[in-house]
Amino acid sequence: MTANTENIRNSGTSGNGIFWAILLASAILEAVWATALGLSNGFTQPAPTVVFAVTAVLSMLGLGIAVKRIPLGTAYAVWVGIGAALTVGWAMITGVESASPLKLLFIAGIVGCAAGLKALPTDKAAVDADKPVADAE
């Protein structure tokens, strides 16, 4: 085992902080592209269509970078959950969707579950995936 791998394993999720920040930024961009998609009216409105295209690409790139250190299932669940919560939240703030106590409770549940996934210790398989093959023996 290399010293770097040992440091990552001992640090829990703290060694992955930049990857979590990238994932959060990507989730925010997911909410932007989802909102822009709705405003594009089937890609007939130029400005929202361009915003959709740019933010969708950036969001996917960020997710791709994040999964270098965050297990794919966890990263995807957080990305979708935070993106969905922000999209619904923005729709309620702007009056596109109605707000209700139950809707707010369920959105809080999504955010809470995403935070719970972030709080879990780093998966050993994700750490071992960064090892060169020679170190695995």
Image (cartoon, grey):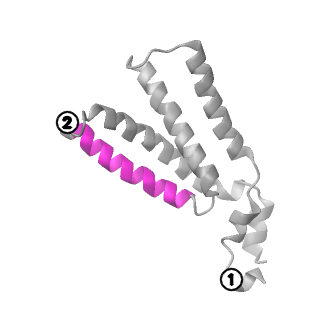
Instruction: Identify whether 124 is placed above or below 109.
Output: below
Residue that numbered label 1 is attached to = 133
Q: Secondary structure at mark 1?
A: helix
Q: Residue at x 32, y 43 (%)?
A: 52
Image position, residue 110 (x, y; %): 61, 32
Image position, residue 61 (x, y; %): 44, 57
Count of numbered badges drawn on the protein: 2
User: Nearest the camera: 24 or 105?
Assistant: 105
Mark 1: which amino acid? Val
The numbered disc on residue 45 is 2
Q: Secondary structure at mark 2?
A: loop
Q: Residue at x 36, y 47 (%)?
A: 55
Instruction: Identify whether 41 is placed above or below 66.
Output: above
* Left or right of 115 in this view: 59: left
N-terminal-most mark, 1 or 2: 2
Residue segment shown in magenta: 47-66
* Left or right of 90 in this view: 76: right
Look at the image and tell me in which quarter the N terminus lies.
bottom right
> Is 70 covered by the magenta stretch?
no
Instruction: Identify whether 84 is placed above or below 20.
Output: above
* Left or right of 53 in this view: 107: right
State if disc 2 and disc 1 touch (CB < 8 Å).
no
User: Nearest the camera: 31 or 8?
Assistant: 31
Q: Main secondary structure of the magenta part?
A: helix
Mark 2: which amino acid? Gln
Instruction: Identify whether 92 is placed above or below 62.
Output: above
Image position, residue 14 (x, y; %): 71, 54
Q: Residues within 10 Å of mark 1 (few under 14, many from 20)?
A: few
Image position, residue 3 (x, y; %): 77, 75
